[in-house]
Amino acid sequence: MSGQAHKETIVSGWEYLKVLIETSELDLAKYVRGNIAAGVRTRRSMRSIKKQVSILIKELVTEMRELEQARIEAKSVQ
């Protein structure tokens, strides 16, 4: 995957993560007011948030490794 593709994936993943968090906040507020079903949705959302963060970390690490590799290759060419 090219560097640009990684960056687009990271940005779109970040936007999705923000939506998940906003949704979780709404359900958490409902749960605090006594809506048990909202608590279930909140826990489910937290699992999705955890998964999304893991995906973003993997993408960031891959991007950083590719940049470092490109930097090393550029130095060796000179």
Image (cartoon, grey):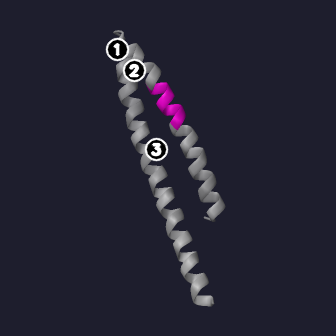
Q: Residues within 10 Å of mark 2 (few under 14, many from 20)?
A: many
Seen at 39% across and 41% down, the residue is 50
Query: Closer to us: mark 3 or mark 1?
Result: 1
Q: Is residue 5 above or below residue 52?
A: below
Quarter of the image where one finds residue 39? top left
Name of the residue lying farthest toward the top:
34
| Tag count | 3
Residue denoted by label 1? 32
The answer to which of marks 3 and 1 sits earlier in the sequence is: 1
Q: CA distance from mark 3 to mark 1?
A: 25 Å
Where is residue 71 shown, x and y percent of the image? 57, 77
Q: Amino acid at mark 1?
A: Val
Q: Quadrant of the N terminus?
A: bottom right
Image: magenta residue range:
18-24
Q: Amino acid at mark 3?
A: Gln
Seen at 44% across and 26% down, the residue is 24
- SS assignment at label 1: helix
Residue denoted by label 3? 52
Are the residues at dot 1 and dot 2 in contact (C-beta closer than 8 Å)?
yes
Asked whether 33 falls inside the magenta stretch, the response is no
Q: Main secondary structure of the magenta part?
A: helix
Seen at 52% across and 73% down, the residue is 68
- In the picture, measured across the screen, residue 8 lies left or right of residue 23, that is right
Query: Closer to us: mark 2 or mark 3?
Result: 2
